[in-house]
Amino acid sequence: NSWSCQCPLLSCASVSLALYQRHNKKYTRHGGETVAEVLKAHGVRFLFTLPGGHISPILVACEKLGIRVVDTRHEATAVFAADAVARLSGTVGVAVTTAGPGVTNTVTAMKNAQMAESPVLLIGGSAARLQKGRGALQDIDQLSLFKPLCKFCASVNSVREIAPVLRKAIAIAQCDTPGPVFVEFPLDILYPYHLVEREVFKNFTSKSLLGKIVNWYLRSYIGNLFAGAWEMQDLSPLPVNLPKASKGQVQQCVELISRAKKPVIILGSQVTLPPTPVKILRDTLEELGIPCFLGGMARGMLGKNSPLHIRQNRRDALKEADVVILAGTVCDFRLSFGGILSKRSKIIAVNRNREQLLKNAYVLWKPTVAIQGDAACFLVSLCQALKGYSCPQDWVTGLKEVDRIKEKANREKAEKPTEQHLNPLKLLHHLDNLLPEDSLLIADGGDFVASAAYIVKPRGPLTWLDPGAFGTLGVGGGFALGAKLCRPDSEVWIIYGDGSLGFSIMEFDTFVRHKTPVIALVGNDACWSQISREQVPMLGSNVACGLDYIDYHVVAKGLGGKGFLLNRENEDQTEELIRTAQSECRQGHPVLLNVLIGKTDFREGSIAV
């Protein structure tokens, strides 16, 4: 009482705080529930995580609201799974990881999402705001770590901020050029008032004047954390903005295409983004009738055997083309930084991101028309404006004939026996013959997977997932997990190299526990072949490239799945074993086919940098 008399202002504040606290103690709600409500309002169906005390309220609240919580064996897998969901569902993918090392373990996966332009929301736990910078468990500056990787980074400072910060983050992830965002939740933002109060005052007993001032400060701190926490707020999604081509730009391109004798379209992953449904885009491309090269997530856009899909000899075709449309495709290493394009060609470049749109422009290539806009929307508008246009058929059939000759040569190479084990090309032809129309392919590897990209044909739009421009190994487990949850009726295959398999083989435990049966096909050549192929002739050593012929099928069995070995001794049973794997998968078992493969010269001359 004597302290109150000495400090009347603090005394009045203490009375107000006491009234507020008595009111707040009636609530057992916590910030994790608000997080779950916002995610639910944005159509989030899956949340990927590896648990930790910093984030437990979010996980429990999401489960109660019907959001499926899927825990993985590594935080990177959680982000890769969220990435796959974002690509396949057209909404944001969500991963939640605990503070410190839980968050830092996601860095590679978040960078991959950034370069793949995938809208991923990473929610990270952190130390309580009151303990930041004071040596709390797993307390680091997480925002500085993610600012170079994300379109938006924020730390939530009070419970009332949860909804507006999350809504903003989700909208930014999907606007313009999509990409990852990071939102940090301090521990005391997520737990109920009474638990936060108990922890704050757990070790505080001083009754001195200084102690009373500290007591007032702490109660003010808690009051500010929870002020207005449970007032009604708008949880609905914010509008998503995206750039579009103008009518004048479309008309300029109509004039170029109308005069073209040898036009070509190169489609990149951006064309699969909302708002244009992939079926409408496919119909648009078929109506245009212009031959197409497909890359990244655009693989499969035209189905298995489209007369417009050109799979081989891209370099020669581009040198001959008079008009080239780069639809969401970037002139980076995949197009020789633009050097693959002919100086004589008219180039129409369309990309949501201005930096990507003009990458290496005016150095090795020059755009005739450069449009910052959504590539799929542009193609639909172009088609509507080109009514009656017909691409010269001799150009289309000529390219397709070259395709046929090259693929015939590939089949002949597949029949040549290797010095030991199976010919990987023949194996991939067997797989292609047996894939059902609803199959979905995940690419995770180097040499074996690059060969598969030439041999195995995705069956339709959004049936091929690869890491993208970052070339990240280890995406397989997470991508397959997200894909199977999005499309439970599809047959999901992971095409693994034996090197890349090592990053995520433990996720077979995840597949078993969460009843997400997938099939892994492992091209096991006991080597990092994509590196070795150039390193040995150039530098004379195979150092660090050699692996062993590991019994990966036994590992899969040990984790609760099914595993089979395929080698030269049972090569005649190749298709039978693939069918067995498919049957086991339909019965609910994740399966690993460990196939010992030999060396071929199929990709001789390709480089790994």
Image (cartoon, rainbow, N blue to C red):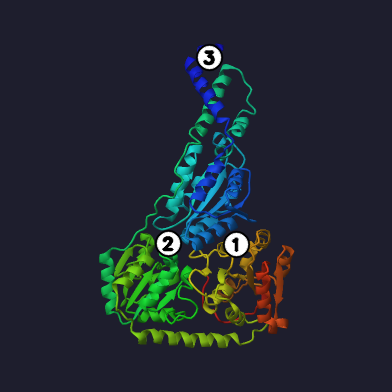
Q: Residue at x 56, y 68 (%)?
A: 442
Which is closer to the viewer, label 3 or label 2? 2
Q: Residue at x 43, y 82 (%)?
A: 307
Q: Which mark is residue 274?
A: 2
Specify whether 120 is left or right of 546: left
| Residue 82 position by quadrant | bottom right
Mark 3, other Cα within 10 Å: few <14 / some 14–19 / many ≥20: few
Q: Which mark is residue 546?
A: none
Hey, what amino acid is under mark 1? Leu
Image location (x, y in percent) of residue 167: 45, 47
Give me the C-alpha separation between circle 3 and circle 1: 60 Å
Q: Residue at x 33, y 84 (%)?
A: 392
Image location (x, y in percent) of residue 423: 63, 82
Marks 3 and 2: CB-CB under 8 Å?
A: no
Image location (x, y in percent) of residue 475: 57, 63
Give me the C-alpha separation between circle 2 and circle 1: 22 Å
Label 1 sits on residue: 481
Q: Is residue 9 above or below residue 437?
A: above
